[in-house]
Image (cartoon, rainbow, N blue to C red):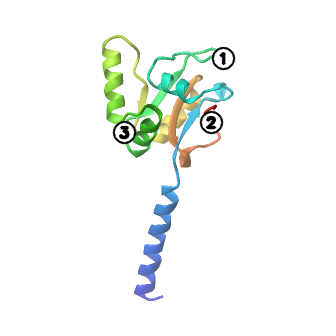
Amino acid sequence: MNTRTLRRLGVLAVLFASLSMAGAAPVIIVNKSIEKEKVDAATLKSVLLGKKVAWDSGGRAILAVLKSGPVADEFLKGAVDMSGSSFNNYWRRLAMTGGGTAPHSFEKEEDLRKYVADTPGAIGFVDSANVDASVAVLTLAP
């Protein structure tokens, strides 16, 4: 192969990789102990904002979030209409006034997923490409 063909193949590989990553989207993951929980958009928002602290089936709702990044921003914008920084500020104020305990925050999606898998009652979000069998994906009820 000549240099020109190799360049074209490289460009196509980069294009294909970016297209395949663009198709991924944030998903809600939960510990398998609560995979049967019925959660609608309003309930999810209540959990994310610390207004709902227990699951209907019993046990504490334990929130795990990504500290920042495009997955966090996309998910939080859709779920609570906040950017990642606005969400973090909301929780900072809530914790400082005694209104709740801040969610467990993670830099890496892999660490968040492991925490949710290992913690009964935990809920979080990751990119759909980072889901594995250790957690359950929660589909919002109508």
**Above or below 85: residue 74:** below
Residue closest to the eye, 125 or 31: 125
| Residue located beneath label 2 in the image | 139
Give coordinates of residue 71: x percent, y percent: 44, 43
Q: Are the two marked residues, 3 and 2, in contact with CB atoms closer than 8 angstroms?
A: no
* Mark 3 and mark 2: Cα distance apart in space: 23 Å
Residue picked out by circle 3: 68
Looking at the rendered image, the disc whose residue lies closer to the viewer, 2 or 1, is 2
The mark that comes first in sequence, 3 or 2, is: 3
Q: Which of marks 3 and 2 is in front?
A: 2
Q: Which of disc 1 and disc 3 is earlier in sequence?
A: 1
Q: Which amino acid does label 3 sit on?
A: Ser
Q: Mark 1 highlights which residue? A: 57
Per the rendering, the mark at residue 108 is none
Q: What element carries label 1?
A: loop
The answer to whether mark 3 and mark 1 are in CB contact below 8 A is no
Q: What residue type is labelled 2?
A: Thr
